Amino acid sequence: MTIRLTIRTAVWRSHVARIANAVDEAGGGLVPVVKGNGYGFGRNWLAAVAADFCDTIAIGTVHELDGLPDQLTVVVLTPTLSPPEAPASGSSGPVLTVGSQAHIDALANWGGRVIVKLVSPMRRFGGDYEMVELAKRAGLHVVGVSIHPPLAGSPEEHAAAITDRLDDIDTSIPVWVSHLDPDQYRALPATHQFRLRLGTMLWHGDKSALHLDADVLDVRPITAGGTAGYRLGSVAADGHLVIIGAGTANGVAMIDEGDRGSLSPFHFAQTRLALHEPPHMHASMAFVPVGNALPSVGDHVDVQRPLHMTAVDEYRWL
């Protein structure tokens, strides 16, 4: 079983550098996001890459704090009701996020740094600017406020979700924003200091640099009406069962097309491979009718799956 991520190293690193430089030219303040599985690269490895060109990174939860470079300031994006240990003497500790009174109450005895999340059209966490004072009264050190626009909408609407809030925000408090490209970031008003969180655009912005595939572990002939799989489903024509070494343990699943149903995530010879049944834990069973391009044992099939949802077994740097 192997699911493999191939990276065109020079192309990928050039893209990352171009985005980082563009943010620097737009005013600086880039905060690379390395949350979850590190966008398919591994969180700690990606944090070490980010440390080469930034002083601050963002992760998803307090459970992702271990193993990160010591020299970085680490911002935890998701509020927690179970804070980490209070920062040791001489250590600043992570920066946590609060987005409601309940989040502030949970950190009442913690005493560290926080970012206050303000409500946006997304409506996932966030309150009014008064939360800044509530956090301070609870003994927390507020180092910024955060505005998180939704993905839906135009670039102008994303920017408006930020600028519409600025009149309420003290100009001495940094404003952390996301879902803007460097040009949109540059166009934000000069009245405030901003920091820009980037994840997908930074790490996956040039998809030509990244390719996901999996091994073919077995190929077995089957005749029309024959049965196979966990549920012994029958096949409608003569062909072959192709066993692919990737499954739900890697995060591989059917592609939900809404009203159009579900599609296989696997492709071979630029043709989507029909799955005989949904992926198993460590393998997936495809059916290839006679006359269609048939992979052999040891061949690689392309995998269509978001990298931030995929557990990669092997990395290949070209």
Image (spheres, rainbow, N blue to C red):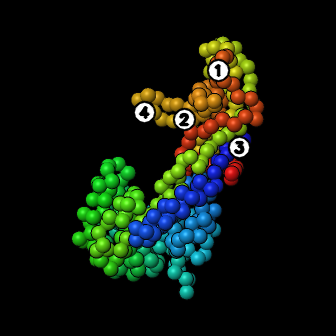
* Residue type highlighted by circle 2: Met
The residue at which mark 1 appears reads as 292
Residue placed at 65% from the left, 41% from the top? 213
The residue at which mark 2 appears reads as 254
Q: Nearer the viewer, mark 3 or mark 1?
A: 1
The residue at which mark 3 appears reads as 2
Q: CA distance from mark 1 to mark 2?
A: 21 Å
| N-terminal label among 3 and 4 | 3
**Residue nearer the viewer, 104 or 148:** 148
The residue at which mark 4 appears reads as 258
Q: Is residue 136 above or below residue 209?
A: below
* Residue type highlighted by circle 1: Asn
Is 196 left or right of 278, judged from the image as shown? Answer: left
Residue placed at 57% from the left, 58% from the top? 14
Image coords of residue 127 (percent x, y): 30, 65
Q: CA distance from mark 1 to mark 4?
A: 27 Å
Task: Identify the image quadrant of residue 9.
Answer: bottom right
Dot 3: few (<14), some (14–19), or many (≥20) neighbours within 10 Å?
many
Task: Identify the image quadrant of residue 118.
Answer: bottom left
